[in-house]
Image (tube, rainbow, N blue to C red):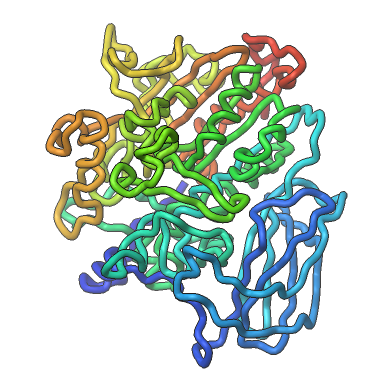
Amino acid sequence: MTMKSPDGALGDDERYRAVFTNYAERPPQAGGNPGIWCYTDRLSYAAGETVVVHACTTARSFDAVLLRDGAAPREVLRRTALAGAFHETPADCSIAGCGWPAAFAFTIEPDWPSGAYRLTLTSGELACEHLFIVRPPPGDRAGRLLLVAATATWTAYNDWGGSNHYEGLTGPTGDRPAPEVSTLRPWARGFVTLPPDAPRAGLAAPPAFGTPVRYPHMEWAWRTGHSKKYASSGWASYERHFVAWAERQGYAVDIVSQTDLHYRPELLDGYACVVFTGHDEYWSWEMRDAIDAYVESGGRVARFAGNFMWQIRLENAGTRQICHKYRAREDDPLYRTERRHLTTGAWEAAETGRPAALTFGLNALRGLYAGWGGCAPRGPGGFSVYRPEHWAFAGTGLGYGDLLGGESRAFGYEVDGLDYEIRGGLPYPAPGEVVPEGLEILALGLTSLVETGPGSLFLGQEDAEYIAGILHGSGEALERVKRGAGMIVHFRRGRGEVFHAGSCDWVAGLIRGDPYVAQVTRTVLDRYLQGQLVGQHPHPNPPPLSRERG
């Protein structure tokens, strides 16, 4: 496998602006540049439901094509010569929604399989893309995987209109992140599709000796007009790669959104295995309830994802997402109420009473950054294996101390971990860590919360100070939090079990054809699919594989 280093096309000044400037797509203006933009009224739909498309364009007419995306994209709908119209857009559209009227609508047909559907509008050289999910029908889904797309994280990073949970146009000086964001706006450029050469957030190769800290994905976005956050989240960077790989391997994959998990937890029924992949950072209390109940009743979760960190709230049927993050204690109106546990900060904050590891075995605060910017950029890029005898490593030939995913840089850019100790050469959760009983740490890699190296550094110390305050009561305790670890863990709970490879970039191993990452992924999925379906008295200890998937 071949990986390229950054091409260095940007000068120092441009590199600085690419990293530190909020250059999000702004609302279209009358008399401005020609264009076309669109969004749908919901994130997901079931068969028989109507999809309402809201569009704004300077063109008199446009065409629309709808594809089910995946290993072999398939066209399901085509409309031509639809009437175009330009609409004024409020300046706070990223918070309140665009408010455009309906442009056209269509019905989800019964024979459209569950999946991610890519809508493309074109008029001459003008084009835009949007994505929504078609939910599976209820009932027995034997032999099928259910992927929960990280749509809350997509929403948190989507900067179309100028604001998201990271940067924004709000606050007294008009430059604060937005604690409330809307789904009723377009996806930013790069969230739906990307060219194959688009850099990932995690570094593709260690920097050369003495070179300054670089953020190749942001430099590329600045140069090409993509969203600065395209590599941090979205279908194009994460879930699409997993679905395409899984379908090529012969797996049948259904998809739901996190909003479905929040409002329709019954969609989990009938599946032996639920999958998460990529960057999966934002969850509501109700979403966790759904997965915890699923596992307790016999479900099996295969989580190839990282950065399980923030609690959110959903309002307006899921079209408004709220997360006050670092300022939850000061600004969230629920903090000083009887619903204090729903305040929208880190899961590890004392007020939630619900440490993240109780659901997936790991938490973001003990992991975070690896192979990104100035955080362990020359690290090994993989997990060091400590328990090679575990069933997840069957067929890999990996032994104690071997590196899993190093060649493909599958460890990064944000990862989940635990505080741990080594006894007899093996890692165990440190005393005081709140984890499910019987949790085993199978492999781990080192992380950092503080960037080092020459050049401009993006992170600063805000993350480290916040985490020090949450974990140790003082933002001055940086020495106690700036070093961490990302991990692979496995545990059983109730009648179900969880395998968690806590890395956003596990999918990079699948993209780059890493045979070790692919084998572990197949082994976990095959074993979990062999289990009986939830609601059918699943066996708490599924048998080992009778064969290895090719």
| Quarter location, residue 444 | top left
Residue at far bottom of view: 31
Residue at far top of view: 424
Q: Quadrant of the C terminus?
A: top right
Q: Give percent across and percent down for residue 229.
A: 42, 59
Residue that appears at 65% across and 17% down: 298
Residue 540 seen in render: yes
Residue 362 seen in render: no
Taking the image as shown, residue 321 lies to the left or right of residue 210, namely right
Q: Give percent across and percent down for residue 321.
A: 50, 51
Judging depth in this view, the residue of 199 and 258 nearest the camera is 258
Judging depth in this view, the residue of 170 and 370 nearest the camera is 170
Residue 449 vertical placement versus 16 (above, below): above
Question: Could you tell me how many numbered marks the image carries?
Answer: 0
Q: Give percent across and percent down for residue 54.
A: 67, 71
Taking the image as shown, residue 200 lies to the left or right of residue 294, namely left
Residue at far front of view: 337
Judging depth in this view, the residue of 153 and 386 nearest the camera is 153
Residue that appears at 18% across and 51% down: 209
Residue that appears at 27% across and 51% down: 373
| Quarter location, residue 144 | top right
Residue that appears at 54% across and 62% down: 194
Judging depth in this view, the residue of 261 and 538 nearest the camera is 261
Taking the image as shown, residue 467 lies to the left or right of residue 85, namely left
Q: Give percent across and percent down for residue 78.
A: 80, 70
